[in-house]
Image: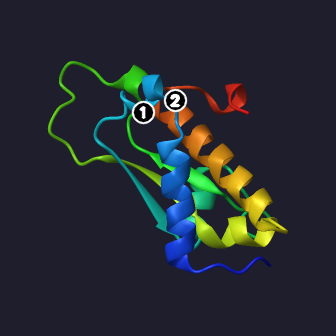
Amino acid sequence: MLRMSRAEFEKLVAQALDRLPERFASLLENVVVVVEDEPTEEDLVEAGLDPETETLFGLYQGVNLLDRGASYGNVLPDRIVIYRLPLLEACEDRAELVREIRDTVIHEVGHYFGVAEEDLP
């Protein structure tokens, strides 16, 4: 397993967000991106995964832009969660980790925009 401090990992997540194309980044509203160590069993089950054998690198929690109606307003922000330990465990070196974080951030931002799981890379 690759080792990295939480602060350094969070910096890589921030860099991935900073590298989003401006046309998408400018549309991100009422969403926060957080780093957590690993998904809960409930998160895995809700995602249709087997907690004994599968894990998540990231998770979008909220109402995507396509499903927000006119009444969507002052609500708690949606969340994009990036899971640190599964990513560290899956990657052999820093370069691979940077790519996986970038891909995970893009994947979860895609969910924010309403892109279905089967249509995401």
Say which quarter of the image contains residue 87: bottom right
Task: Look at the numbered discs 2 and 1 and tell me whether their residues touch, using CB distance below 8 Å.
Answer: yes
Q: Which amino acid does label 2 sit on?
A: Pro
- The answer to which of 76 and 109 lies nearer the viewer is 109
Numbered-mark total: 2
Q: Is residue 42 above or below residue 2?
A: above
Badge 2, how many Cα within 10 Å: few under 14, some, many 20+? few
Q: Position of residue 7 (x, y in %)?
A: 49, 75
The image quadrant where one finds the C terminus is: top right
The spot of residue 51 in percent (x, y) is 70, 66
Q: In which quadrant of the rendered view does residue 93 lie?
A: bottom right
Residue annotated with mark 2: 21
For image coordinates 51% across by 29% down, the residue present is 21
Up the image or down, 50 lies above or below 72; here it is: below
The residue drawn where x is 79% and y is 58% is 96
- Residue lying at 59% horizontally and 39% vertically, measured from the top left: 106
Where residue 99 appears, as percent x and y from the top left, is 72, 50
Residue drawn at x 49%, y 65% is 35
Q: What residue type is labelled 1?
A: Ala
Q: From the image, tell me which residue sits under label 1.
A: 25
User: Circle 2 — which element?
Assistant: loop
